[in-house]
Amino acid sequence: MSTPAVTPGRFYGVGVGPGDPELVTLKAARLIGAADVVAFHAGRGKQSNARRIAAGLIPPTALEEELVYPVTTGGTDHPGGYAGAMADFYLESAARLAAHLEAGRDVVLLAEGDPMFYGSYMYMHDALSERFATEVVAGVPAFAAATATIASPLVRQTDVLTILPGTLPETELARRLADTDGAIIMKLGRRFPTVRRALATAGRLEHAVYVERASMDTERHLRVADVDPDTVPYFSLIVVAGDSLQGVGRRTQEAATPRLGAASAEVSAEVSAARDTPAEVVVVGLGPGPAHWLTPEASAVLAEVDHVVGYAPYVKRVPHREGLTRHASGNTVEVDRGRLALDLARRGERVAVVSGGDAGVFGMATAVLEAQVAAAAEDATYAAVGVRVVPGVSAVQAVAARAGAPIGGDFAVVSLSDRLKPWDVLERRLRAVAEADLVLGIYNPRSASRPDQLGDALKVLLEVRAPGTVVVVGRDVGRDEEELRVTTLGELDPTSIDMKCLLIVGATSTRVDHGRVWTPRTVG
């Protein structure tokens, strides 16, 4: 008589929360109380925190599997080093749990916080979930308990939250901290001094809060600047509230908003306290994107100023360093940005306004000068602020260089955005360029709010130019996502174009030879 096959047990990854047993969910408590096997990870010579949290829920009939890490922060003589030792450990642990499951026992693996958030459960899930019926039960993550502990909102509305491991390289950590609104930094321990330096570099140290053992009886929290690095355990974290809440770090909107369009009376009272150096705003062209296209002059200016003002994506490209305040804003307040920069300069601050490509080509140089004229009409002292423009590689130059030499002869550039000029003006200019047989660079060709204008522009050009006219399409030139293609005026599909593109429409003489596009310098 054959023995009936044993029905395999179910595998549960159960989050037990950050430390307070009262934060264990009802579902987690029910599954733990019904488990045949309760498993948990533990450090060598240490009590499992997950097991401590769930202690009152584990039934006396349950088998317990303690999975002890072979190494945590110390060294190992494993031939594969730390990674090899841990890989073997996870394989061995999975085999131990699989034996119970194959015997028909339901296994609950306890996970501190949430099972799928920086935890060891994930490795067991990878090894066992394809072989056995598996269920994951979410738990309260440590950062949620931490924000509750300090009673501080983390992000609101459209703020972006970034969760970062403190084990990242210092420069990468600083970059990500400066480029986000709210942040959580996990895995501190011996990395705490590095993390604190990264916070300072990114300008986020002042309001960063350190939280240790959130929700436990021994929890504590204090300003990161006041923490003794020698007392920081691995399972601690740092909360950096979003800028809309604290006005810290990048100091984007809060730094900018009070000054955008503000009256100059308050600033005038501060002029007497300004530095002895003449007030100056430096408008800097950052180039199309790659760091190696940033000029040495631009780099030198950005290394010396106290404030950087600009459209958020461009401000993010400025290297982070301690003492630099970043004022980022949206894409339709150019003159307000200029006024802010002028106000800062009149207070004696060293300030740069950044612009993509060349600041003088559809960039911030004109906006700053426009703001200065308007401000000087109200207060003549604004006229004394110097405005210096540092050139950069323009997008049309970058695309042309990638293609060959399409602007080697006479050429014109036009922006298809009609935000500052009516469409009928654009039509006249497009027709005039076509009739003059100039190479044409087209900025801002097509956006979600202007889906039809590029098609209309092509119709205007085709009234004068032949359908076979060469067209170069460059997208994200100089970046990892760079695309470059050569087509013709008649074959160009407007729906394939977006705001990341720049177009170069050739003249009658523009040629394509051996894959390179070029326009002769001679005409006729």
Image: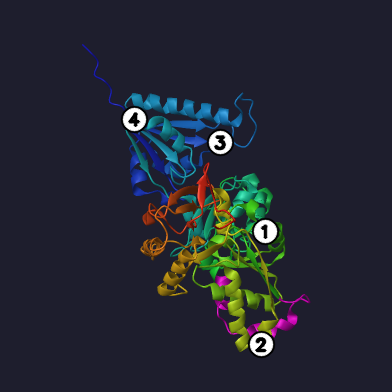
- Mark identifier at residue 321: 1
Frontmost residue, 132 versus 218: 132
Between the C-alphas of marks 1 and 2, the distance is 34 Å
Q: Nearer the viewer, residue 85 or 163?
A: 163
Query: Residue tagged by mark 2?
Result: 380
Q: Marks 3 and 1: in contact by CB < 8 Å? A: no
Above or below, comparing residue 291 to residue 67 in the picture:
below
Looking at the rendered image, the disc whose residue lies closer to the viewer, 4 or 3, is: 4
Circle 4 residue: 132
Which element carries disc 1, helix, strand or loop?
loop
Report the Cα–Cα distance between label 1 and label 4.
Answer: 51 Å
* Percent coordinates x, y for residue 329 in the rendering: 53, 68
- Residue type at mark 3 is Gly
Task: Please report the residue visible at 64 percent of the width from the left and 49 percent of the height from the top.
Answer: 170
Query: Which is more foreground, mark 1 or mark 3?
Result: 1
Q: Which residue is drawn at 50% across and 52% down?
A: 474
Q: What residue type is labelled 1?
A: Arg
What crowding class fits label 4: few (fewer than 14 Cα within 10 Å), some (14-19), or many (20 or more)? some
Q: What residue type is labelled 4?
A: Phe
Cα distance, mark 4 to mark 3?
A: 27 Å
10 Å crowding of disc 3: few (<14), some (14-19), many (20+): some
Marked residue nearer the N-terminal end (3 or 2): 3
Q: Where is residue 48 in the image (x, y as percent from the top left)?
A: 51, 39
Q: Give the range drawn in magenta.
A: 254-279
Q: Looking at the image, can residue 481 be seen? A: no
Q: Are marks 3 and 2 in contact (CB under 8 Å)?
A: no
* Circle 2: residue type: Ala
Disc 3/disc 2 C-alpha distance (Å): 70 Å
Mark 1 or 2, nearer chain start = 1
**Cα distance between the residues tagged 1 and 3:** 38 Å
Q: In terms of secondary structure, where does tag 3 sit?
A: loop
Label of residue 43 in the image: 3
